[in-house]
Structures are given as C-alpha cells and as structure tokens.
Amino acid sequence: KESSVSKTAMAERMKTSRRQLDRLLDPQVPNITLATMSKAARAVGRELHIALV
C-alpha cells in the first residue's frame, strides 16, 4: 500500500529540509545510511527490516 504523505510533510516528520529529502530519494545519490532509511520509513508510518541471508 502506498503512503499519501507529501514530500514536504515527510521532510518535516524527518526534521530535515525538502532539499535534503530530494537528495535522499534521488537514485543517483547512492550513499544513504541505515539510520536515515529507518527515519524515512518511520516518517511514512512504516518500519525498516533488513535481513542478511
């Protein structure tokens, strides 16, 4: 199910700027930390789960 959170609202929930969020979501900028990914997931009401198999 997709979330209907706007980028502006998501940035506010993450306590970051819209510009930083745009960088985070840009597939051309691959350097993102797990902490940031987790924060982004929580901002849209989700959890980040990582498995090493």
Image (tube, rainbow, N blue to C red):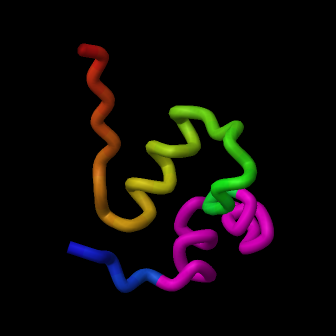
Quadrant of the image for the C terminus?
Answer: top left
- On screen, residue 37 above or below 34: below
Q: Position of residue 27 (x, y in %)?
A: 64, 55
Q: Is residue 53 above or below residue 7?
A: above
Q: Is residue 5 shown left or right of residue 2?
A: right
Q: Residue furthest left?
A: 1
Check the image and name the residue furthest to the top.
53
Q: Position of residue 48 (x, y in %)?
A: 34, 42
Q: Residue at x 30, y 16 (%)?
A: 52
The quadrant in which residue 51 appears is top left
Residue at 57% across / 43% down in the picture?
36
Q: Is residue 37 left or right of residue 49?
A: right
Q: Is 9 colored magenta in this rendering?
A: yes
The residue segment tinted magenta is: 6-23
**In the rendering, at what x and y percent does residue 21 appear?**
68, 64
Looking at the rendered image, the quarter that the N terminus falls into is bottom left
Q: Quadrant of residue 15?
A: bottom right
